[in-house]
Image: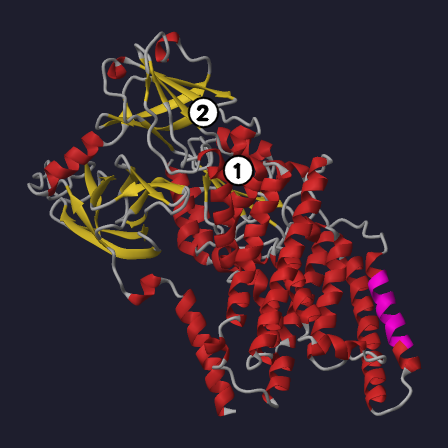
Amino acid sequence: MTRLLAGIAAILGLSLFLTTPAAAQQVRHVQAELVTDSRGIAPGGTIHVALRQQIQKDWHTYWRNSGDSGEATRLDWTLPTGFTAGDIVWATPGRHPTGPLMNYGYQDEVLLPVAITAPKSARPGTMVTLKAAAAFLVCADVCVPEDADLSLTLPVTAGAPDPDTVWGPKIAKALADAPKPGGLDAVFSVKPAGIALAVTGAPLKGADLADAYFYPYEGNLIDHARPQPIERGPDGLTLTLAGAYGFQQGRSPAVLSGVLALGGKAYEITAKPGVPPPGAAGLGAPPVKATPGPAGGAGLGLVAAVAFAFVGGLILNLMPCVFPILAMKAASLAGHAHEHAAARRQGLAFLTGVLATFLSLAGLLIAVRAGGAAVGWGFQLQSPPVVAVLSLLMLAVALNLSGLFEVGASLQGVGQDIASKGGLVGAFFTGALAVVVAAPCTAPFMAPALGWALTQSPPAALAVFAGLGLGFAAPFTLAAFAPALLSRLPKPGGWMEGFRRLMSFPMYGAAAWLAWVLTVQAGSSALARVFAAAVVLALGAWTLGIAQRRHAAGGKPLAHALTGGVLTVLAFLACVWPSYAEVPAAGAEAGSDATAAIPYEAWSPDKVAAAQAAGKPVFVNFTAAWCVTCQVNEKVAFSTPQAAAAFKRSGAVYLKGDWTRKDAVIEAELAKHGRAGVPLYLVYGAKGGEPQILPQLLTPAILTAAVEKAARS
């Protein structure tokens, strides 16, 4: 028992080490502080307080649009009563290519000013403390999330405060150098070669255009990693931008906003669809050499998508969706820990099951979409019969792990042959089941890869899904080929049976979760049916177990075997019989709760437009009952007093789009934002514009900061 506990502790310790963020190791790559341009603040006055980042050599932080990966710096202010903070004034970013990706951000040192305004009621002679919780992602070859609780104490002065002689000039320069409108006119048009962005105006006449580059505010409009060829004209220039999935499918936004940087200056531009003016390019002017970009040419999009899918598949192993399946994987690996050849065969069989199932689901998805149906990734769990069958399948696996019956112990001894081959069929089945249940959840990096894949040709799409499967299977398969790691597990013995039965409980939990999903999809009558089928299945499994034990004792188990088989078949047939017609009552969206802390309405494009027209911020939550990540976010981020208070203060309209059942309108909206599945979180500012896309894993701090920022923007 001591060796068993030591082995489990070693595995858990290794897992925690691999999954704990590097920030928790107290390694700081960014030194952050608040600095100000004034030595005080007057009642009703405005000063600028800047977040200063001193970034370690060869590391970088991120701009408001981080590019292909990364995350923008965030500031969550805590100010005295009546004080207000404006938005971050973002410095012009630099380009940071990483392999096939292009990211936007800062290195060495950067000042990010924020306007702070005092109320007219502020009392001269008192001291005020400005606090900000800063969060930033800092990257080199790896990325580390860091945060800092910062504060700055200033006096309230009767008159205009004295300038800060050290930071005043530097903040003034940062404000002067920050991108701002410069009287430029911009239009864009979608062409086969890409997006033609034409910009004209006096600042461009005679300017050096060789290093011109457009940084879009939205992260999902252009292919950031592709070069931006430039054509010079007498009055300006035209950039050709490689469009992302939305443009490639002919979906064009109302505006294209961002920063045009050239010659050491930067201008904010907002382009609307239109015909480029004659002076923007051409007229005999020679083309300027294209801005250098990563190698890859036309295949760069595929390479980047496969890389994203592989990383997303790796991370998917840490998502809540996969936790029940980890029980099966752990029990399988533990059983062959000291049989290296058998462990390797198990790993390869699991890999084969994962790849075969991923590619089969992807092929079916592509075929269904080609037929005009509005489905996305996770479509298999939008069907009540499929959910019901999976619930019974999880129950059957749990009963097997509990020892009620055995797989591969048939009366004719066929199962013994399978067992002698190392349980390869079981490992293959484990990989297949893991994909069916876990794939509908979306891990970081998966969303853009799948969104891109579903707009491409079938071979390219299947290549992306193969990359996803390889990433998903890699940890288990590599562990099976690591004798040093496997040797740390206790040698086979009586503990294995106890461990196997312990692992049955996550599977019982998975069966219960899927039964709840079925209730959300098809109502209480469906739950009654699946419960009845579960009882019949359990009886059938028990009867099969009796037959197996009689066979082992030399008896005649035929009657019990036939009875158990018939009962099992009847249980599954009851779940696929097509009578799931009941639809949940209106308002029964995924994960809804009558006592939910944040009131919400069902999402529709009209409701978003109406809220924006009324000047209200909007938070849209695309979710599904079968998405475990969505449900975890509901409990961790949404169902907290902090989130409820933020929604109440901001007056944000909270809308939920429930994708538990098929919905063509929601599928189209997901595709519009480059997503093939849920969760997807969109935040629209009170003043309109394109939404901000939040990470797929939320915390109360991320949610609160996004809602409060939307109320100000």
In x, y percent, where is residue 69? 41, 45
Q: In terms of depth relative to the viewer, which is nearer, 637 or 433?
A: 433
Other-residue count near label 2 (Cα within 10 Å), few / some / many at <14 / 14–19 / ≥20 = some
Image quarter for residue 209? top left
Q: Identify which residue is drawn at 82% across, 62% down.
A: 529
- Up/down of 369 relative to 350, above or below: above
Instruction: Tell me the element at label 1.
Output: loop
Identify the residue shown where x is 52% and y is 62%. 474
* CB atoms of marks 1 and 2 within 8 Å: no
**Going by the image, does 184 lie left or right of 404?**
left
Q: CA distance from mark 1 to mark 2?
A: 15 Å
- For disc 1, the marked residue is 673
x and y, in percent, of residue 665 in the image: 65, 36
User: Is residue 413 visible to us here?
Assistant: yes
In the rendered image, residue 594, in percent from the top left (x then y), is placed at: 62, 55
Magenta residue check for 566:
yes
Comparing 435 with 65, the one in front is: 435
Q: Amino acid type of disc 2?
A: Val
Left or right of 120: which side holds 165?
A: left
Question: Which one is nearer the viewer's eye here, 26 or 3?
Answer: 3
Element assignment for label 2: loop
> Badge 2 is on which residue?
255
Give the overall secondary structure of the magenta segment.
helix
Q: Which residues are magenta?
A: 562-573
Q: Quadrant of the C terminus?
A: top left
Q: Is residue 634 visible?
A: no
- Compare residues 2 and 173 and report the one nearer the observer: 2
